[in-house]
C-alpha cells in the first residue's frame, strides 16, 4: 500500500520525477513570488549600466546560496521577463544577476532600435565580452560567488552566452534558449570551459536546424561537453510568457533539463 507523503516522494531518488515536480512548483510559485531583488548600477568603459540582482530566497533549506546564475537578456534589453526568471531561480536557492548589455535606461521597443543595439554588439564582440564580464563583477560586488556560476540567455542573450563560452571564461556552464547559434569567422570553441546547453525550437525560422547541426559539429570537434535539444513544433522565442509564440511544453521541458544540469553543476 502506498503511504509515502508527497514530500517524501519528491525527495526520493527518482531524478526525473524530482525535476518535474521542481519545475511545476516553480511555475505555480510565480503567482506568489515576492520580489526581493533590486536594480544595481555599475559602470563599463565609463558608461552607466543597470542590472538586476536577486539573492537566493530566504525560504530555501540552506542559508548559503547554491551559486550564481547570470541571465543575459533578449534584444529588447533587460525587462520584466528576465526579472521574472531571476525570481524563479532565486526561489531555487541561487543568487541571480540579470545583466544589462545596452546601457542604463536603454530598453528598445521598436524593432529597428532593437536591431541597432544588438547590431552594435555583434560588430564589437570584445565590447560584448567586457559587458558580460563586468556583469559578473557587479554580481560579485553584491556578494554572489562568481567562481561558482552558470550563464544563461534568451534569443539575443542566447547568442551572447555562446560568445561568453567562446571567450574561455571559467564558468560551470552556458545555456542558450532559442538563441543565435552562428559562430563568427575566426572564432571557435577550443578555449571553452564548462558545459554548453542549447535549447532550440525546430520550427524556428530565424535560426535553422542547419545552424543547430553546425554548432553541434563545432562543439564535438572541439571536445566541448554539450547537450543540445530541439523541440518539434516550437517556434523562435518559445519561452516568452504570454506571447503568441509561447510553447508551454518546450518551455517546461527545457526548464526541467536546465535544472537537472544545475543540480549537477551547482548542487544543493
Image (cartoon, rainbow, N blue to C red):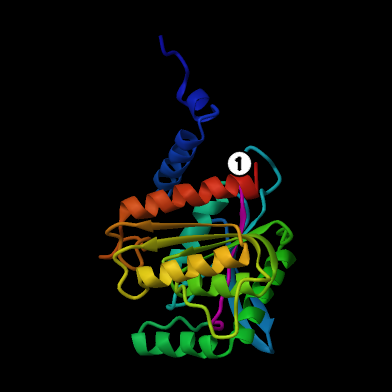
In this view of the protein, which residue sits in the foreground, 86 or 58?
A: 86
Q: Residue at x 47, y 88 (%)?
A: 119
Which quarter of the figure is the C terminus placed in?
top right
Q: Is residue 73 above or below residue 61?
A: below
In this view of the protein, which residue sits in the foreground, 214 or 109?
A: 214
Assess whether residue 248 is covered by the magenta stretch: no
Q: Is residue 13 above or below residue 128?
A: above
Highlighted magenta segment, given as a residue range: 93-104
Q: Give the quarter of the image for residue 40.
A: bottom right
Q: Is residue 116 above or below residue 211?
A: below
In this view of the protein, which residue sits in the foreground, 58 or 268?
A: 268
Q: Looking at the picture, how far across and down is residue 163, in whole percent?
A: 58, 75
Report if residue 32 is visible in the image: no
Q: Residue at x 42, y 78 (%)?
A: 76
Report if residue 203 is visible in the image: yes
For label 1, count other residues whose C-alpha is less than 10 Å away and answer few (under 14), some (14-19) or many (20+): some
Extreme residue toward the top, this view: 1
State the SS at label 1: loop
Name the residue tied to disc 1.
60
Q: Looking at the picture, how far across and down is residue 232, in whole percent?
A: 30, 57
Q: Is residue 218 left or right of residue 62?
A: left
Q: Residue at x 48, y 49 (%)?
A: 257
Q: Residue at x 49, y 69 (%)?
A: 215
Q: Looking at the picture, how far across and down is residue 159, in whole percent?
A: 50, 74
Amino acid at each position: 500500500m502506498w503511504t509515502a507523503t508527497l514530500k517524501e516522494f519528491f525527495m526520493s531518488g527518482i531524478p526525473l520525477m524530482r525535476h518535474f515536480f521542481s519545475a511545476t512548483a516553480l511555475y505555480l510559485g510565480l503567482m506568489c513570488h515576492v520580489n526581493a531583488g533590486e536594480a544595481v548600477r555599475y559602470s563599463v568603459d565609463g558608461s552607466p549600466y543597470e542590472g538586476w540582482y536577486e539573492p537566493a530566497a530566504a525560504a530555501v533549506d540552506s542559508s548559503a546560496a547554491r551559486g550564481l546564475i547570470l541571465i543575459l537578456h533578449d534584444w529588447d534589453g533587460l525587462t520584466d521577463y528576465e526579472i521574472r526568471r531571476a525570481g524563479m531561480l532565486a526561489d531555487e536557492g541561487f543568487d541571480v544577476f540579470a545583466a544589462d548589455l545596452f546601457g542604463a535606461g536603454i530598453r528598445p521597443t521598436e524593432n529597428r532600435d532593437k536591431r541597432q543595439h544588438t547590431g552594435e554588439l555583434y560588430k564589437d564582440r570584445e565590447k560584448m565580452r567586457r559587458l558580460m564580464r563586468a556583469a559578473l563583477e557587479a554580481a560579485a560586488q553584491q556578494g554572489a560567488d562568481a567562481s561558482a556560476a552558470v550563464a544563461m540567455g534568451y534569443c539575443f542573450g542566447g547568442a551572447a552566452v555562446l560568445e561568453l563560452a567562446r571567450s574561455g571564461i571559467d564558468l560551470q556552464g552556458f545555456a542558450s534558449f532559442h538563441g543565435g547559434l552562428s559562430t563568427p569567422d575566426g572564432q571557435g570553441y577550443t578555449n571553452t570551459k564548462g558545459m554548453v546547453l542549447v535549447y532550440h525550437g525546430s520550427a524556428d525560422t530565424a535560426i535553422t536546424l542547419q545552424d543547430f547541426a553546425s554548432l553541434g559539429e563545432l562543439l564535438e570537434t572541439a571536445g566541448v561537453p554539450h547537450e543540445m535539444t530541439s523541440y518539434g513544433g516550437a517556434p523562435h522565442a518559445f519561452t516568452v510568457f504570454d506571447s503568441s509564440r509561447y510553447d508551454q511544453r518546450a518551455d517546461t521541458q527545457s526548464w526541467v533539463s536546465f535544472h537537472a544540469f544545475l543540480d549537477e553543476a551547482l548542487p544543493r
